Image (tube, rainbow, N blue to C red):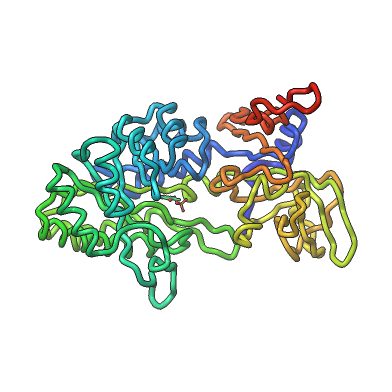
Amino acid sequence: MKKVPFVTKEKLDEIVKEYPTPFHLYDERGIRQNIKALKEAFAWNKGYKEYFAVKATPNPFLIDILREYGCGCDCSSYTELMLSEAVGACGEDIMFSSNDTPAEEFVFADKLGAIINLDDITHIDFLEKAIGHIPETISCRYNPGGLFKISNDIMDNPGDAKYGMTTDQLFEAFKLLKAKGAKEFGIHAFLASNTVTNEYYPMLAKVLFEAAVKLQKETGVHIKFINLSGGIGIPYNPDQEPNDIRAIGDGVRRVYEEVLVPAGMGDVAIFTELGRFMMGPFGCLVTKAIHEKHTHKEYIGVDACAVNLMRPAMYGAYHHITVMGKEDAPHSYKYDIAGSLCENNDKFAIDRMLPKIDTGDLLVIHDTGAHGFAMGYNYNGKLKSAELLLKEDGSVELIRRAETPSDYFITFDCFQIGKKLIK
Ligand SMILES: *Cc1c(COP(=O)(O)O)cnc(C)c1O
């Protein structure tokens, strides 16, 4: 599928007059259309709720948009809980799906009334010590181990993942929690990441639904929800076929009717904790070509670097690039698109065929709306960029300003260089 930026060159030329590159730009229209489609796909389930994975795009302005559609927040840290509280999410609007959790984070999650999703059986005692009781509603994270396969294709390797409890531990945990007073139970699993197939969720649902039926029978607990978590991917590469969320919703429904309904469990709510699927395609990184370099390879140096988008450096991930205004020019130049870090993996693309790039050209790096800005760091003393929202009416709102040197130095409370306090 041809990848076209959600912003035109004319609009972008206008935006860069006011906001210097690089920046992340988000598409309000796309975000809204997508959440509507997701809700429709799961409308058959009365209790359905999406808990947006805050870590993917921790920006309150964007989460506010999702909140309009009834989304909750999936958190895994203290500050993510703070952010959720700030957007008005509290109580069962927060899912706390953390791992290796510090006691004070359990305390805060409990104070907000969040649903706590336990990553390990030992966390039952740990939680009880931390907050003084076991909540009435509680969830456990399941990891059946082994390989997760779809018709012989290995999707991911849960047996190698640090998350979740084994099958035996899950049963044991439910019994223990019930004995300690828990009344409503949830099951959660995240077994494959960035899946670009309509089969992942239905297959995961089957694993979880079958476990739920056994759990309810053997332990007598009431299972209130099953959390399919994240993992629905996006087509980063133009060759990939995008997921059809309607087909995914229908697939889960079929398994629900096949496994849960006959077991008298037709009241179980389906939850999701999608991050990438909710925001990924609806954000891009806008950067400018500032250098061209002809050595052993052809390089284009841009004003963004891995600090703004780490996925290519970290995972070798593909992000499509559009050279604005040259969409129809022949892609006859082979470039490495490089950032300015003193790290040779700081490249947004390697040996990529693109139109001839001139200094000053604007490049749109696609699909940075999730796990993009959020993964940023400050290596080489580089500062994080602004985040902008392209609204439905065509106007642009600054939803996070760019960092300044004083942000970078702010954690030195008292170090003085000469007489100058860095602030
Ligand atoms: C990262 C994460 C998600 C979101 O994953 P996506 O791949 O962005 O959908 C959901 N739940 C948990 C527990 C996670 O760690």
Q: Is residue 291 above or below residue 88?
A: below
Relative to 229, is 309 on the left or the right? right
Residue 10 image point, x, y percent: 74, 37
Which of the pair 178/386 is nearer the observer? 178
Q: Residue at x 57, y 31 (%)?
A: 391
Looking at the rendered image, the quarter that the N terminus falls into is bottom right
- Give the image quarter of residue 121: bottom left
Image position of 263 (left or right of 37): left
Residue 67 vertical placement versus 359 (above, below): above
Q: Quadrant of the C terminus?
A: top right
Residue 147 vs residue 132, the one in the foreground: 132
Q: Residue furthest right?
A: 294
Residue in the picture at 50% in, 40% down: 31
At which x and y percent is residue 401?
Answer: 65, 29
Identify the residue shown where x is 62% and y is 33%: 388
> How far across and down, in percent of the image, does residue 198 sit?
40, 62
Q: Is residue 235 left or right of residue 248?
A: right
State the image coordinates of residue 218 (x, y, percent, origin top left).
Answer: 11, 60
Q: What residue occupies the far top of the structure in this picture?
A: 419
Q: Nearer the viewer, residue 317 or 363?
A: 317
